Amino acid sequence: GIDHKPYLAAEKGDLGLGVLVAVRSRLDPESLLNPGKLLPEA
């Protein structure tokens, strides 16, 4: 959840974070679901 935000980049790395952002942008292209809560906006 949102409690992971402070260390998400360190835990997943740049590649992992990039994959998460890419998947989110495909599943929620208008960023309607919790925008900016956990992942940076694409």
Image (spheres, rainbow, N blue to C red):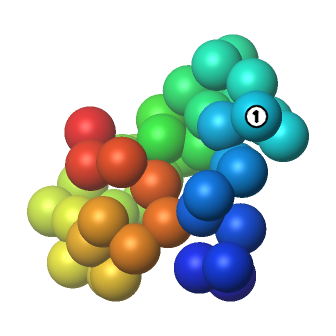
Residue 2: name its quadrant: bottom right
Tell whether 32 sits left or right of 9: left
Query: Total of numbered circles in the picture?
Result: 1
- Residue drawn at 70 percent across, 49 percent down: 8
- Is 32 placed above or below 14 here? below
Tell whether 27 sits left or right of 20: left
State the quadrant of the N terminus.
bottom right
Local packing at callout 1 (Cα closer than 10 Å; few below 14, some 14-19, many 20+) is few
- Is 5 placed above or below 35 here? above
Q: Amino acid at mark 1?
A: Ala
Estimate the x, y position of residue 27 in percent, counting from the top left: 43, 59
Residue in front for this viewpoint, 37 or 7: 7
Estimate the x, y position of residue 17 in percent, counting from the top left: 62, 34
- Residue drawn at 27 percent across, 49 percent down: 41
- Residue drawn at 50 percent across, 66 percent down: 38
State the quadrant of the C terminus.
top left
Residue in front for this viewpoint, 22 or 13: 13
- Residue drawn at 27 percent across, 71 percent down: 35
**Mark 1 sits on what residue?**
10
- Say what secondary structure mark 1 lies in: helix
